[in-house]
């Protein structure tokens, strides 16, 4: 069940797409217009020591990779570093935000860990959230979100159209309009 005016959006990407660039450019455009964007966007690759993220509220780059043997294989995400990034985002959220961007939905978020607490916190404060979700993780995302999410193609135009709808809905409530499913179930 999807609702075009839902405050929670999944930017669904294929392996050949770069959701980080889409989210980074989107956040930069919004920030230039005075929108307070909080969250982070991934930089580097999970399978090497370049894994890092950029905090969107201040531009700081944080290393997220473990310090492993260069020959080690698999994702090198350091969970303590991810938790630290989450704490920094939570602190920034306490100062207010117009939008929260979470870099990825993965197995940690599926299991209620990782940055999942930031999604709940933002939505509880009526702050819209967008998160990159790999196509292969989308069924898990649907379960996590209880179906209360907008599915966006990994394109800047799709993200912009969703944001315009959210921003317009927050600007001037229309007494003639009907509440969305997301609004009813909040």
Image: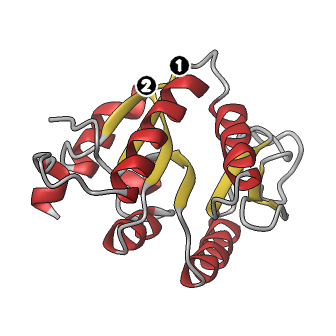
Q: Residue at x 46, y 68 (%)?
A: 118
* Quarter the C terminus occupies: bottom left
For label 2, the residue is 135
Instruction: Report which residue position mark 1 lands on.
Output: 14
Image coords of residue 157 (percent x, y): 55, 24
Q: Is residue 67 above or below residue 162?
A: below
Number of numbered discs visible in the structure rendering: 2
Q: 136 left or right of 145?
A: right
Where is the N terminus found, in terms of image quarters?
Answer: top left
Q: Position of residue 146 (x, y in %)?
A: 18, 49
Bin the neighbour count of mark 2 within 10 Å (Cα to Cα): few under 14, some 14-19, many 20 and up: some
Instruction: Choose between 186 and 61: the one closer to the eye.
Output: 186
Q: Position of residue 11 (x, y in %)?
A: 48, 34
Considering depth in this image, is 94 or 89 the residue closer to the camera? 94
Mark 1 in CB contact with mark 2 (< 8 angstroms): yes
**SS assignment at label 2:** helix
Q: Look at the picture and state if 87 lies above or below 146.
A: below
Q: Residue at x 48, y 42 (%)?
A: 163
Q: For label 1, count other residues whose C-alpha is less than 10 Å away and answer few (under 14), some (14-19) or many (20+).
A: few
In the image, residue 173 sits, relative to residue 137, either above or below, namely below
């Amino acid at each position: 069940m999807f609702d075009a005016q839902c405050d929670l959006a999944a930017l669904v990407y294929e392996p050949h797409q770069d959701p980080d660039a889409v989210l980074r450019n989107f956040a930069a455009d919004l920030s230039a217009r005075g929108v307070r964007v909080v969250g982070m966007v991934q930089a580097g690759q999970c399978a090497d020591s370049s894994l890092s993220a950029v905090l969107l509220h201040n531009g700081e780059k944080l290393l997220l990779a473990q310090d492993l043997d260069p020959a080690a294989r698999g994702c090198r995400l350091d969970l303590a570093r991810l938790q630290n990034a989450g704490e920094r985002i939570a602190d920034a959220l306490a100062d207010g935000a117009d939008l929260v961007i979470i870099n990825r939905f993965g197995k940690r978020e599926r299991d209620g860990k990782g940055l999942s607490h930031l999604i709940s916190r933002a939505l509880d404060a009526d702050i819209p959230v967008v998160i990159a979700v790999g196509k292969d993780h989308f069924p898990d995302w649907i379960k996590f979100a209880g179906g209360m999410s907008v599915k966006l193609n990994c394109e800047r135009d799709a993200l912009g159209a969703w944001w315009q709808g959210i921003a317009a809905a927050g600007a001037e409530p229309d007494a003639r309009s009907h509440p969305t499913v997301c609004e009813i179930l909040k």
